Image (cartoon, helix red, strand yellow):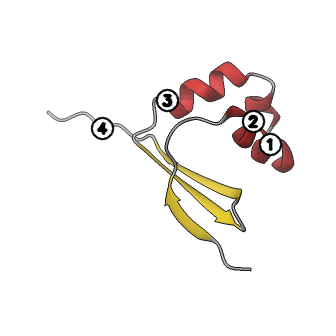
Amino acid sequence: MEATLKEYTGYNEEEILGLYTSLGWTNYTDKPEMLKNAYLNSLKIYGAYVDGKLVGIIRDWLVTDIL
Protein backbone atom coordinates (compact mmCIF):
# COMPACT_ATOMS: atom_id res chain seq x y z
CA MET A 1 0.00 0.00 0.00
CA GLU A 2 1.52 3.28 -1.11
CA ALA A 3 0.12 6.62 0.02
CA THR A 4 0.14 9.82 -1.98
CA LEU A 5 0.63 13.06 -0.05
CA LYS A 6 -0.88 16.25 -1.46
CA GLU A 7 -2.09 19.60 -0.24
CA TYR A 8 -5.62 19.36 1.14
CA THR A 9 -7.70 22.22 -0.18
CA GLY A 10 -11.27 23.03 0.68
CA TYR A 11 -13.12 21.42 3.54
CA ASN A 12 -14.98 18.14 3.06
CA GLU A 13 -16.61 17.59 6.43
CA GLU A 14 -17.91 14.11 5.60
CA GLU A 15 -14.46 12.93 4.54
CA ILE A 16 -12.67 14.46 7.53
CA LEU A 17 -15.25 13.29 10.08
CA GLY A 18 -15.03 9.80 8.59
CA LEU A 19 -11.27 9.77 9.14
CA TYR A 20 -11.53 11.11 12.71
CA THR A 21 -14.34 8.68 13.55
CA SER A 22 -12.29 5.73 12.28
CA LEU A 23 -9.54 6.76 14.71
CA GLY A 24 -11.88 7.27 17.66
CA TRP A 25 -11.07 10.98 17.97
CA THR A 26 -14.41 11.95 19.51
CA ASN A 27 -13.43 15.38 20.80
CA TYR A 28 -13.73 16.73 17.26
CA THR A 29 -16.40 14.37 15.95
CA ASP A 30 -18.68 15.41 18.82
CA LYS A 31 -18.08 19.07 17.92
CA PRO A 32 -17.91 19.30 14.11
CA GLU A 33 -18.07 23.11 14.14
CA MET A 34 -14.90 23.19 16.27
CA LEU A 35 -13.23 20.82 13.80
CA LYS A 36 -14.20 22.99 10.84
CA ASN A 37 -12.88 26.08 12.60
CA ALA A 38 -9.57 24.31 13.30
CA TYR A 39 -9.19 23.46 9.62
CA LEU A 40 -10.16 26.90 8.39
CA ASN A 41 -7.54 28.43 10.71
CA SER A 42 -4.72 26.08 9.68
CA LEU A 43 -1.76 27.50 7.79
CA LYS A 44 -1.32 24.41 5.57
CA ILE A 45 -3.06 21.06 5.37
CA TYR A 46 -1.79 17.91 3.65
CA GLY A 47 -3.76 14.74 3.09
CA ALA A 48 -2.48 11.20 2.61
CA TYR A 49 -4.49 9.16 0.12
CA VAL A 50 -4.56 5.48 -0.77
CA ASP A 51 -6.59 4.57 -3.82
CA GLY A 52 -8.26 8.00 -3.69
CA LYS A 53 -9.38 7.62 -0.06
CA LEU A 54 -8.18 9.99 2.67
CA VAL A 55 -6.24 7.91 5.19
CA GLY A 56 -4.28 10.59 7.05
CA ILE A 57 -4.03 14.32 7.50
CA ILE A 58 -1.40 16.81 8.67
CA ARG A 59 -2.28 20.34 9.74
CA ASP A 60 0.18 23.15 10.37
CA TRP A 61 -1.36 25.49 12.92
CA LEU A 62 1.62 26.86 14.82
CA VAL A 63 1.73 30.62 14.99
CA THR A 64 4.66 32.43 16.56
CA ASP A 65 5.03 36.05 17.56
CA ILE A 66 7.68 38.15 15.92
CA LEU A 67 9.16 40.75 18.21
Q: Earlier in the sequence, mark 2 or mark 3?
A: 2
Q: Which mark is residue 47?
A: none
Q: Earlier in the sequence, mark 4 or mark 1?
A: 1
Q: Position of residue 55 (x, y in %)?
A: 72, 59
Would you name the residue on which mark 1 appears? 18
Quarter the N terminus occupies:
bottom right
Residue 38 lies left or right of residue 64; in this view the side is: right
What residue type is disc 3 on?
A: Leu
Given this view, does label 4 or label 1 mark the residue nearer the observer? 1
Whole-Å distance between the Cαs marked 2 and 3? 15 Å
Q: Which is more toward the observer, 16 or 42? A: 16
Q: Is disc 3 placed on a helix, strand or loop?
A: helix
Given this view, does label 4 or label 3 mark the residue nearer the observer? 3
Q: Dividing the picture into quarters, in which one does residue 4 lie? A: bottom right
Q: Position of residue 43 (x, y in %)?
A: 39, 40
Q: Is there CB contact under 8 Å for labels 4 and 3?
A: no
Residue 63 lies left or right of residue 38; in this view the side is: left
Whole-Å distance between the Cαs marked 4 and 1? 31 Å
Whole-Å distance between the Cαs marked 4 and 3? 18 Å
Would you name the residue on which mark 2 appears? 14
Whole-Å distance between the Cαs marked 3 and 1? 18 Å
Q: Earlier in the sequence, mark 3 or mark 1?
A: 1
Quarter the C terminus occupies:
top left
Given this view, does label 2 or label 3 mark the residue nearer the observer? 2
Q: Is there CB contact under 8 Å for labels 4 and 1?
A: no
What residue type is disc 2 on?
A: Glu
What residue type is disc 4 on?
A: Thr
Would you name the residue on which mark 3 appears? 40
Q: In the image, what residue occupies the spot 45% across and 40% down?
A: 61
Would you name the residue on which mark 4 appears? 64
Q: Is there CB contact under 8 Å for labels 4 and 2?
A: no
